[in-house]
Image (tube, rainbow, N blue to C red):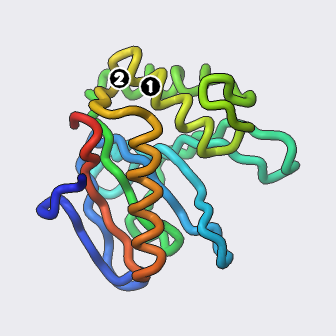
Amino acid sequence: MPTAEETNQSDKGVSQLNFEVNGLYILLSDRGDKSYTFHWRFYLHQSSTSGSIYHLLNDIDPAIWRFGHLPDQTVIYDPLLLGALKIGVLDPTLHAHFLERLRQIPIVDSVRFRERITCRVWLKEALFELDDEGYIMLMRSVDDIEAEARSLALQNKSLARRTVVRSGGSQG
């Protein structure tokens, strides 16, 4: 479970969120409709105000997914961001390797999770590989981390708030 002292709650349109430098987060963003589905991304906070986003997109053709890397992003003011779940800390010497590793995650339907490829399913595959290779240390299953992130976003969407919390299912 997230720890209360590491939770930063704020009105969605007013103040910023606080991220730890070198912290690795799962971001869930509102897709802008009344559904309770979200856009899932990794975020590596690299300076006091910005970091890199890593995600899958199908913005050109709904049937074609592609990896996206957006450096120097300031997500603290993103009005669509519902929640950030901290899953680890990456030493700065690993940042470039981390990007290259994420580029290698296959963009195909998941045999492991038995689901069609989406930004969420790709993130789950990446979580499994990152844990297996020691980039992060999960203490619970990937499905548990997914449920924790989804619960955070659902609660925040219903309460019209944004939070940053530390995952109860990982070290970091």
Q: In which image quadrant can residue 55 be found?
A: top right
Q: Name the residue carrying label 2.
A: 135
Image quadrant containing the C terminus: top left
Q: Looking at the image, which residue is at 87% across and 49% down?
A: 61
Q: Looking at the image, which residue is at 38% across and 52% down?
A: 148
Q: Which label sits on residue 98? A: 1
CA neighbours of label 1 inside 10 A, class few (<14), some (14 to 19), many (20+): some
Q: Looking at the image, which residue is at 61% across and 24% down?
A: 112
Left or right: 76 with respect to 71? left
Question: Which one is nearer the viewer's eye here, 162 or 150?
Answer: 150
* Residue 156 x, y percent position in the rendering: 41, 73
Report how many numbered discs are placed on residues in the image: 2
Do labels 2 and 1 touch, CB within 8 Å?
A: yes
Name the element at disc 2. Answer: loop
Q: Earlier in the sequence, mark 2 or mark 1?
A: 1
CA neighbours of label 2 inside 10 A, class few (<14), some (14 to 19), many (20+): some
Q: Looking at the image, which residue is at 39% across and 32% down?
A: 141
Q: Amino acid at mark 2?
A: Tyr
Residue 130 vertical position relative to residue 142 in the rendered view, above or below: above
* Residue 18 x, y percent position in the rendering: 26, 62
* Residue 93 x, y percent position in the rendering: 31, 22
Left or right: 130 with respect to 136? right
Residue at the top extreme?
133
